[in-house]
Image: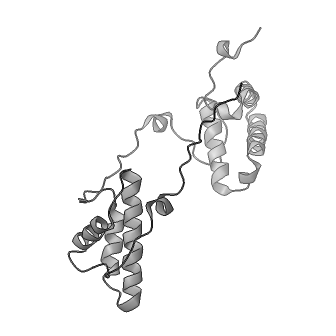
Amino acid sequence: MDYNTKRKKMALPEYGRNIQNMVDYLLTIEDREKRNRSAQTVIDVMGNLFTHLRDVQEFKHKLWDHLAIMSDFNLDIDYPYDPPSPESLNERPNTVPYSKNRIKYKHYGKTMELLIQEADNFEGEEREIIIEQLANHMKKSYLAWNKDAVEDQMIFNDLEEMSRGHLKVPEGTQLADAKTLVGPSNKKKKTKKKK
């Protein structure tokens, strides 16, 4: 029996063993012109595996890169693009720069702070609607991170503090109920089976 565990490890298993066998065969072809034509045929077959992307220019480039990788960079053909170097596969990616912004209330997030700053630019009835919407969203965010019930007054105080006293919730404003904001739980009730 010929088991996959005994076979050569594939560089890109998403193309499958047959495509890898075709690439391995390309390495045995001595005539350069025939090898170039055969490589183009293998690229077409690889493209057929992902038909929805076959005609995209970047996709063609990626296929040629994959062909070079699958041949372990030993395939001597006329590439239409510069193939990647073996060293480029082992390069570590650049570190992602993290924001140094200090967020006082992390459960509300940076976006909420930015929205509160923008809400200060509105006037009249529109401003009151925005303040109420912000407070409801803050309550929803609070409940997402803290499963305890929260008093509306606490949300109002946080909103006022985050806006440096510029946004005050109008008297008599009632925020949406916690069940409405969070939605029904996905837990299924266990039922006892009758014997």
Q: Position of residue 81 (x, y in %)?
A: 61, 48
Q: Residue at x 63, y 32 (%)?
A: 12
Which is more toward the observer, 140 or 80? Answer: 140
Find residue 67 and report its image quarter: top right
Query: Would you place residue 33 above or below residue 180 in this image?
Result: above
Left/right placement of residue 144 relative to residue 73 reads: left
Q: Residue at x 41, y 82 (%)?
A: 129
Left/right placement of residue 192 relative to residue 159 reads: right
Find residue 194 and report its image quarter: top right
Which is more toward the observer, 145 or 84? Answer: 145
Q: Residue at x 64, y 18 (%)?
A: 8
Q: Residue at x 49, y 36 (%)?
A: 89
Q: Position of residue 17 (x, y in %)?
A: 73, 26
Which is more toward the observer, 156 or 61? Answer: 156
Is residue 168 in sight in this rendering?
yes
Left/right placement of residue 56 relative to residue 165 reads: right
Q: Residue furthest top?
A: 1
Find residue 191 and report its image quarter: top right
Left/right placement of residue 82 relative to residue 140 reads: right
Is residue 29 in sight in this rendering?
no
Q: Position of residue 127 (x, y in %)?
A: 37, 85
Query: Would you place residue 41 above or below residue 31 in this image?
Result: below
